[in-house]
Image (tube, grey):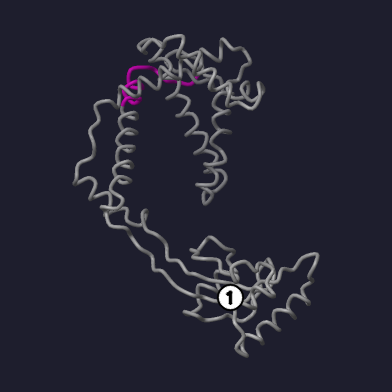
Amino acid sequence: MTLFVDGEKIEDAVIQEEVERLRAHHDRVFRDMSPREREAQLLDWSRENVIERVLLNQYVRKHGDRIPKAEVEAAFDRIKKRSESDEQLEKEFGTSDEGQIKDRIELNMKVERALEKVCSNLTGPSEDAVLKFYEENKKQFESPARIRVAHIVKHIDGRTDQATAYRIMKEVEDKLRNGAVFELLAAQYSDCPENGGDLGYIARGEMVEEFEDVVFNLGANEVSEVFRTRFGYHIAKLYDRKPALTPPLQEIRNEVIRELREQMRNKAVDDFVDRLKSKVEIKEA
């Protein structure tokens, strides 16, 4: 089946290029879907993206502002400078022809300016909208619970085998039970001796799971027994806990307003594209 947008033929290869462009992010976000469902959704979204892009291009070719040649040339120079090579530039635009690349740049600039006009009359969100968004999305702004923890670690690697690493760490554990200072032992025995083994404040998800399962269950100033992770053997000490905190609205008001303005802009663009869709024929043949 071939896609036509207001009579303009869209090659299947264009849609497949969009599929591959979106694939990595899409598959990561929707990894819980079955492979068949995920692929079907990816194809559908890619098709819609291409249709919308074609509609916008068609619109600005007829109604877009004229872009001065000097602005196009300047934009081309900036893009060329940031490209690592001519091959990268060709890959980005699908051609090595400078004239065609400049035509693409000019078209993109026309689209950007058309969308700026679409959004030019948007006003800022109301105070009620700001408060409502904050109340409904507090989790989004929450700072996670954190702990300050230190560890003594003996890696299992080419220098230290498993049996030796475990023996050394059991010796350290005995010294701690007999009153030795944790930070001094870290400086003497640990493969990561900096700052007495202090890792600072960490949240869940920042360290390997085996490590977090132990340290997040320690009490204040409690020292763990020897335990194993994929890196080797550890002894950990917990210094402090900070609970999860949600900042008050006044501290993140600007962030909330930016988010709402972006939502308003996206809706204005979506509505504009929907109006373009309603005026043309989109079919497969």
Q: Is residue 121 above or below residue 257?
A: above
Q: Please identify the quarter of the rendering in which residue 90 is found.
A: top right
- Residue 83: percent from left, percent from top: 60, 26
- Residue 45: percent from left, percent from top: 47, 34
Q: Residue at x 45, y 12 (%)?
A: 7
- Which residue carries the number 1 mark? 236
Q: Is residue 240 above or below residue 103?
A: below
Q: Please identify the quarter of the rendering in which residue 271 is found.
A: top left
The quarter of the rendered structure image containing the N terminus is: top right
Q: Verify whether residue 252 appears in magenta.
A: no
- In front here: 58 or 226? 226
- Magenta stretch in the rendered image: 272-285
Looking at the picture, which amino acid does disc 1 mark?
Ala
Q: Residue at x 59, y 76 (%)?
A: 183
Give left or right: position of 244 versus 134: right
Q: Residue at x 43, y 19 (%)?
A: 109
Q: Is residue 72 above or below residue 263?
A: above
Q: Residue at x 58, y 80 (%)?
A: 224
Residue sticking out furthest to the bottom: 178
- Residue 236: percent from left, percent from top: 58, 75
Numbered disc 1: secondary structure: strand
Give left or right: position of 282 versus 161: left
Give left or right: position of 92 versus 49: right
Give left or right: position of 65 versus 94: left
